[in-house]
Amino acid sequence: MIFAGACFMALAGGASAAVAAEKINIYSHRQQVLIQPFLDAFTAKTGIETNVVYAAKGLAQRLKAEGPASPADVILTVDIARLAEYADLDLLAPIQSKILTENIPSRLRADDNRWFGLSERARILVTSKSRVADGEIADLEDLAKPEWKGRICSRAGSHDYN
């Protein structure tokens, strides 16, 4: 089985045994509406159908319980926290793919090729021109200054995406 954060490019290029199959089984934490266009394009390019199990939680435990009999070929996660969970449970196997290593920068993949990242999230600081002077906030550390207490809008600090 192949367990990776991403490997559609490798599959499209014939770098996996899963390509020999007419179907590929994917366990996905990503929302269907967000990845369906990519799945459709993959099927159109390769002729390989995709069977996807979508779940917000519990896929790592399911995969662990299924063991070597798991039908999963690929895992798509939504963040590094879930990826770390799969790694901690020793559910990832290295992928040798010239397509992946040539197209995905080293900062977006594990040193041992056990996972490949498809995307990154930007964290953007936006300020009000009427309340914050240019240069008043030069970097994120400035937000910790006492004058900004109670004036910052963000999601909870305990959220996975922070």
Image (tube, rainbow, N blue to C red):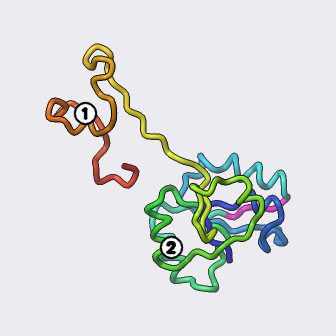
Tell me which residue sits at (66%, 49%) in the image: 36
First of labels 1, 2 by sequence position? 2
Res. 152 mark: 1
Q: Is residue 122 above or below residue 36?
A: above
| Number of numbered tags placed on the structure image | 2
Q: For residue 157: magenta?
A: no
Query: How many residues crowd mark 2 within 10 Å: few (<14), some (14–19), many (20+)?
Result: some
* Residue shown at the point (28%, 47%) measured from the top left: 156
Q: Position of residue 106 (x, y in %)?
A: 62, 57
Left or right: residue 154 compared with residue 22: left
Judging by the rendered image, the residue that carries numbered circle 2 is 87
**Percent of width and height locating residue 66:** 56, 83
Magenta-highlighted residues: 47-51
Q: Residues within 10 Å of mark 1 (few under 14, many from 20)?
A: few
Instruction: Give the residue type that dot 2 points to.
Output: Ala
140 or 30, which is in the foreground? 140
